[in-house]
Image (tube, coloured by chain):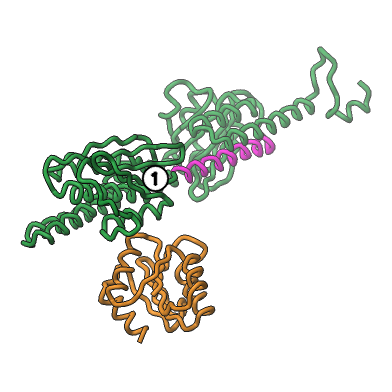
Amino acid sequence: MSSVQRENPVVETPPPGETPDPATLSLEQRIRQQEILAALGVIALQGASFDELLRETARQTAAGLDADFSKVMEFIPSENRLLVRAGIGWEPGVIGVASVGADTASPAGYALRTGKPVISNHLENEERFRTPEILRQHGVHRAMNVILQGDGSPFGVLEVDSRSAGEFDERDLAFLQGAANLLGMAIERERHERQLRGALERQQALLKEVNHRVKNSLTIVASMLSLQAGEVGDPTLTVHLEEAARRVSAVAKAHDQLYQSSDVEQMDVGRYIESLCKDVDASVAHCEVHTDAEHGIVISTDNAISSALIVNELITNAEKYAYRGQSGCNIWVAVKRTAPDRLTISVRDEGEGLPPDFDLRKAKGLGMRIVGSLAKQMNGAFEFHRRQPGTEFVVVYPI
Amino acid sequence: VLVVEDEPLIRMNAVSMVEDAGYVAIEAADADAAIAILESRDDIRVVFTDINMPGSMDGLRLARAIRNRWPPIRLIVTSGLIRPKEGEFPADGRFLPKPYAADHLAATLRELAA
């Protein structure tokens, strides 16, 4: 080797069989450390699981420093101890179990309390700190401790230990602190995510509670109207109050459905109308309501409620006018997707047909006006078909 | 009286209250439809509008637009969520909190139309 080559060890490739000089070795180690930090950064950003992240940090820092042991310790404030959460090289029964004191008399505790890194290259001569028992048991000669800083309170300490002779220097420390900072960032992000998840869960629970209360309140209103219907002593008024109670119940039913689902913005319109029809069928003794509702058509809650109100009005209408309140009446309700983006609601009776001059646009009854108005709101069409016997009312709207 | 309200059942109810109070009611589902109606006819004396509506304008902006373009028209705004502060809607307008009673709306209409 010429003297010129020796001055440029960066580009030098040592000849085979020759021992590389210490400068090259040291440089190679620094490059490896850089690569490890880069790899750890990627793992931290990719959002690996928390335990995986701790394990990987322990493994990589030990590798980067040619150390036998490494451990990530979490500060447990209630016990004032640092618990070994992850590590590499230790005998069984250390990880998840062993802990060291978090007071400033232990090197790890000192790093945690002061934020200052601690290098102990000769533990057997160490006088500043007491050497933790697990280090003694594992024959550790030298150790390095750095703080794992979170946003607010520190998470704990990252420690690397070695049995071999030699010394950890400032550059090793910079590497370890770099790894600790990356881990600290990832831990902080994980903390935020956990808090967000918690907040989201609380919000969803609250939303459920609100829907439950709305449903209960509406049910109380419906019950009061229904009670009044029984007391009023005027048959016409009784009918009106019962209709009002049923309209309120139809809306209450939506909140019952929402309360049981995880999504409040949308709902399965078929299931909702099916359960509404079941209620109406049970409450109107002289009428049988046959329902054929397709499941799995999920639409906005607003439109689902409008659809249920439409069905409710059309059933009332059939019962009142087509069958004139007689017993033995049958009403068929169908909810179907008739095109990929089109929902068809149909209510059919086999009662007395509509008068020959019936005109939907001129219909004065409240029920017809409600249906027309709700259909229009959904950009839908409201029409009727004369059947033999009876009538079918159809509302079609885009979904 | 032009009734501007996006919720169809509430609009139906408002229209019937206005009619029961003895006025002719015209209806619009949002601010844009209301403006189109105001541009096409000149017999509207009062606009009764909800504040919270979808579309390009809410009820407060609609009220201000009407005040600028049709100064003689009187305004009533309503909301179940918002209590507008003074200065947020025209000084000669009225605010009715939701839910409003038929009597209250009728009295307000009489006062404004007088």
Q: Which residue is label 1 attached to?
A: A396
Does any portion of residue B87 appear in the rendered image?
Answer: yes
Dividing the picture into quarters, in which one does residue B49 lie?
bottom left
Please state if A172 lies on the left or on the right of A20 as rendered.
left
Chain shaded green: A
The secondary structure that most of the magenta stretch takes on is: helix
Residue drawn at x 32%, y 68% is B14
> Where residue A144 sits in the image (x, y, percent)?
59, 35
x, y (%) of residue B92? Answer: 42, 84
> Which of the image's four quarters has the N terminus of chain A?
top right
The amino acid on which the numbered mark 1 sits, given as a three-letter code, is Val
In the image, residue A363 sits, relative to residue B78, either above or below, namely: above
Rendered view: B39 above or below A319: below
Near-viewer residue (A178 or A376): A376
Q: Is residue B103 left or right of residue A64?
A: left
- Where are the magenta residues, as a range? A168-194
